[in-house]
Amino acid sequence: MKIGQNAPQIYQYPLNLFQGEVPTDLEDMSYKFTPLEVSKVVDRETKRIELLIGKFIYSGFNIWTT
């Protein structure tokens, strides 16, 4: 692959997990979770995520897409 004008752009999205509804206070938004918990959620919701952002890969606490 050649870096330059035709190189793909890769975007990174951080993952935050929370219980219940989306909180209004950012301090209460995320809680401590493990990469295992993230992988379970992403594996279960892969189809929904692909509908939102297209094909993706995930690593740790991030989703990567082009």
Image: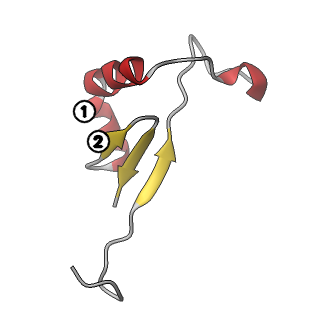
In this orientation, which residue lies closer to the viewer: 3 or 15?
3
Q: Secondary structure at mark 2?
A: helix
Question: Which disc is residue 30 wearing?
Answer: none
Outermost residue, bottom side: 5
Amino acid type indicated by mark 1: Lys
Q: Is residue 36 visible?
A: yes
The x and y percentages for residue 16 are 55, 30
How far apart in space, not on screen, are marks 2 and 1 (Cα)? 5 Å
Are there few (<14), some (14-19), or many (20+) residues within 10 Å of tag 2? few
Viewer-nearest residue: 43 or 35 = 35
Q: Amino acid at mark 2?
A: Glu
Q: Secondary structure at mark 1?
A: helix
Residue tagged 1:
47
Identify the image's colour scheme: rainbow, by chain, secondary structure or one colour: secondary structure
The one nearer the camera, 21 or 39, is: 39
Residue tagged by mark 2?
50
The quarter of the displayed image where residue 39 is located: top left
x and y, in percent, of residue 33 in the image: 52, 18
Judge whether 63 appears above or below 48 on screen: below
* Residue 66: percent from left, percent from top: 34, 61
What x and y, as percent, mark residue 44? Answer: 27, 21
- 24 relative position to 11: left or right: right
Q: Is residue 24 above or below residue 9?
A: above
Q: Is residue 13 left or right of residue 57?
A: right
Whether tag 2 and tag 1 are in contact, CB under 8 A, the answer is yes
Q: Quadrant of residue 37?
A: top left
Q: Residue at x 57, y 18 (%)?
A: 18
58 shown above or below 45: below
Residue 25 is at least partly visible in this image: no
**What is the quadrant of residue 6 in the picture?**
bottom left
